Image: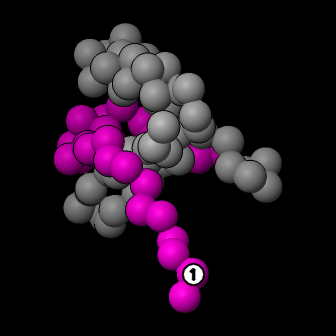
Amino acid sequence: MHNKIIKIKHITGTYTIDVKEGKLNEMQSQLDKCLNDEQGAIVVKGENGDQFVYPSDFLKNSFISIVDREEVKEI
């Protein structure tokens, strides 16, 4: 199974959210809720315990795509 990421392109820059394996449907559901004003934001915890908040207004004004993670190949 491919690892997925969510790319958010906003006027302020491009942001990515790593989707953990088996959590794609949950993340899609949270995105839908934000876009339909049922949820205020998506909160994602980083590896170091940092929290990233993506407010629904931010998401509504962005281009969002779910793509395969690009594998880094060692030479």
Magenta range: 51-75
In this orientation, does residue 43 appear? no
Looking at the image, the residue that sits furthest to the bottom is 75
Quadrant housing the C terminus: bottom right
The one nearer the camera, 39 or 19, is 19
According to the image, label 1 marks what residue? 74
Task: Judge from the rendering whether residue 44 lies leftward or rightward of residue 29; answer left or right.
Answer: right
Looking at the image, the residue that sits furthest to the top is 38
* SS at circle 1: loop
Q: Position of residue 66 (x, y in %)?
A: 32, 42
Looking at the image, the residue that sits furthest to the right is 48
Specify whether residue 60 is painted magenta: yes
Specify whether residue 53 is painted magenta: yes
The relative height of residue 43 versus residue 69 in the rendered view (above or below) is above
Q: Position of residue 56 (x, y in %)?
A: 36, 31
Task: Judge from the rendering whether residue 46 lies leftward or rightward of residue 11; answer left or right.
Answer: right
Q: Given the image, on which type of amino acid does mark 1 rest? A: Glu
Q: Name the residue: 68% across, 49% down.
A: 46
Q: Position of residue 36 (x, y in %)?
A: 26, 16
The relative height of residue 60 versus residue 50 in the rendered view (above or below) is above
Image colouring = one colour
Q: Name the residue: 42% across, 36% down.
A: 55
Q: Position of residue 68 (x, y in %)?
A: 37, 49
